[in-house]
Amino acid sequence: MKKFAVFSGFLGSGKTTAMMALTNYYTEHYAKAAMISNDLGEGVTLADHRLAALSGAASSEITDECICFCHDVLTARLDAYYGDGFELVVSDIPGFGVGALEHVYHGLARDFPGRYELAPFTVLIEPRNAGLLRSGQAGETGYILRAQLMEADLIVLNKCDLLTPEAAEELRNWLAEEFPQAEVLGISALTGDGLEALAAAMRTGRASLRHPDIDYDGDDLQNAMDRLSEYYLQYRAVVCCNDFDGTDYLADIARGVQRTLKAGGREVPHMKFLAWEPEGDFGKVDLLGVGRPLVITRRFARPCTEIAVIINASADCPAVPLDEAVAEAVENVSREYQLELQIFKKDVFSLGE
Ligand SMILES: Nc1nc2c(ncn2[C@@H]2O[C@H](COP(=O)(O)OP(=O)(O)O)[C@@H](O)[C@H]2O)c(=O)[nH]1
Ligand SMILES: [Mg+2]
């Protein structure tokens, strides 16, 4: 079997976490599965792939370009995995992912007929955004969420651990009524609930290869894309004396960025703060909107003396003020923690340029 699935969905919906959980589950129960983190940043080892690798998932990344537009790179990667005995490969989509059904699935079906089995085109949504969409309060994000869900063969309501079973069922029912072309599943990528159903959908389900009318060339998508910036910073931080709490350090930086962006009326759908120490222990903090509480995704088990840090984001904020907000927070907090910094790489760009 050479099954391939795209996992689309809004920033922060849990694509990376779900792909990690699914590939591990699938490998344990069925056959070898792997994941590809697709990112627009240049170079290698952006936050999602680093996280997946630290977590032990079979993982690789495709950077610089969306798999929508580099089928040669994608097919070479897929063929290498299938040649190696993998039976399922899942990849996410950078940015908003809108249009990936056409560009990836139809592109592969047209140019490489019969070479891969396309699993259901899968779109993740988190309860908060499903709720906002349902109540008509999603604002400009509403267009993006709706377009993503219209592309779906399979809608995955993720983070169901944050809901009561009744509330999860109600949201699933609403999604099924509103997007009748798709099957709807509820999972928690964090607890593993629902992974069997997701694995079964990958095994037995098929892509429908429809052509939904998502107004791909319309102003709504273009405007949203134009406002999006990508941010990437990697550095090493060494404490001058004693040790420090790496998780608190990441959270303090995240709070600093959050304060500045909030004061400037900016938004950041998803900013990741990932750090690891030489032994492989790691910590991660996620900022999923300036008005939402920080999420401590993973705590360092021990105090740190030296860490490598990646700060990686898609933000609704022009590149310059975004860069300034992060630089200020990193500088202030690192001084407070008495850390010496060595910057390896910085890459900040607007998608609209
Ligand atoms: N409570 C909860 N949090 C989750 C779940 N899945 C992902 N998250 C968290 O949501 C945040 C964004 O997840 P991520 O996988 O990076 O989202 P992506 O941007 O779509 O790839 C992280 O803090 C995750 O730990 C889940 O099932 N339940
Ligand atoms: Mg991700």
Image (cartoon, rainbow, N blue to C red):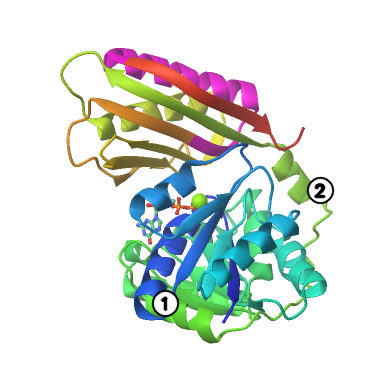
Q: Quadrant of residue 247?
A: top left
Magenta extent? 312-339
Helix, strand or loop at mark 1: helix
**Where residue 131 sits: x, y (%)?**
50, 61
Residue 226 position in % (x across, y down): 73, 38
Left or right of 19 in this view: 349: right
Element assignment for label 2: helix
Mark 1 closeness class: few <14, some 14–19, many ≥20 residues within 10 Å = some
Please name the residue that numbered disc 1 is placed on.
169
Spatial CA distance of label 2 from label 1 is 34 Å
For badge 2, the amino acid type reads: Asp
Q: Residue lying furthest bottom in this view?
A: 204
Secondary structure predominantly adopted by residues drawn in magenta: helix
Against 62, residue 287 (above or below) is above
- Can you tell which mark lies on residue 238? none
Instruction: Identify the residue shown where x is 52% and y is 57%.
Output: 129
In the rendered view, tell whether residue 149 sits above or below residue 137.
below
What amino acid type should be assigned to the residue bearing mark 1?
Glu
Quarter the C terminus occupies = top right
Q: Is residue 14 visible?
A: no
Q: Label 2: few (<14), some or many (≥20) within 10 Å?
A: few
Image point 36% across, 40% down: which residue?
Answer: 285
- The disc placed on residue 219 is 2
Instruction: Name the residue located 40 percent from the left edge and 59 percent from the top edge.
Output: 57
Residue 320 inside the magenta-drawn segment: yes
* Lower sequence index among marks 2 and 1: 1
Tell which quarter ligand 1 is in.
bottom left
- Name the quadrant of the N terminus: bottom right
The residue that appears at 77% across and 73% down in the rendered structure is: 112
Is 180 placed above or below 18 here?
A: below
Quick one: 106 or 43, which is closer to the camera?
43
Judge whether 31 appears above or below 35 on screen. below
